[in-house]
Amino acid sequence: MGSAQWPASDLLFIIRSGEPIRPSAVRRSMALYGVRSGIGHVTPHMLRHSAATEMLANGAPPIGVQRVLGHRSLRTTLETYAHACDTHAAEAMARRFGR
């Protein structure tokens, strides 16, 4: 980038003019780099889902994951990501009881 200065912004993702990056540009970039990397089709929602699953599978409290995701109800989080909670519970049981 050389000595070019980016504008100050409270936003995490901006373009050179300082405007927010467009959601369509994010989706397009993710699709492109997903294919280039050999992962295949990738969307922002898939990353959100993966992040939530990993948080829960690694022992994050469900209430914290609910807040990060912005779900109104803890039930929504638990019903959507029950598989991650099940995995975490099974691994904890295996560690505790050696199975």
Image (cartoon, rainbow, N blue to C red):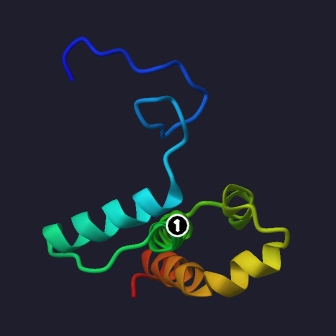
| Residue behind mark 1 | 48
Circle count: 1
Q: Position of residue 69 (x, y in %)?
A: 67, 62
Q: As drawn, is 90 to the left or to the right of 39?
A: right
User: Which quadrant of the figure contains the C terminus?
Assistant: bottom left
Residue 81 appears at what percent x and percent y? 61, 81
Where is residue 25 drawn, in percent x and y? Answer: 41, 57
Residue at the top extreme, as displayed: 3
Residue visible at 53% across and 18% down in the picture: 8
Query: Which of the image's four quarters has the N terminus?
Result: top left
**Above-or-below relation of 69 to 89:** above
Quarter occupied by residue 83:
bottom right
Residue displayed at 52% across by 72% down: 45
**Which residue is at 51% across, 75% downward?**
92
Label 1 is placed on what type of residue? Arg
In the rendered image, residue 93, in percent from the top left (x then y), is placed at 52, 81
Q: Quadrant of residue 41?
A: bottom left
**Badge 1 element:** helix
User: Which residue occupies the extreme right position in the image?
Assistant: 72
Q: In the shown orientation, is residue 88 left or right of residue 42?
A: right
- The crowd level at tag 1 (other Cα within 10 Å; few <14, some 14-19, many 20+) is few
Vertical order, 3 against 98 (above or below): above
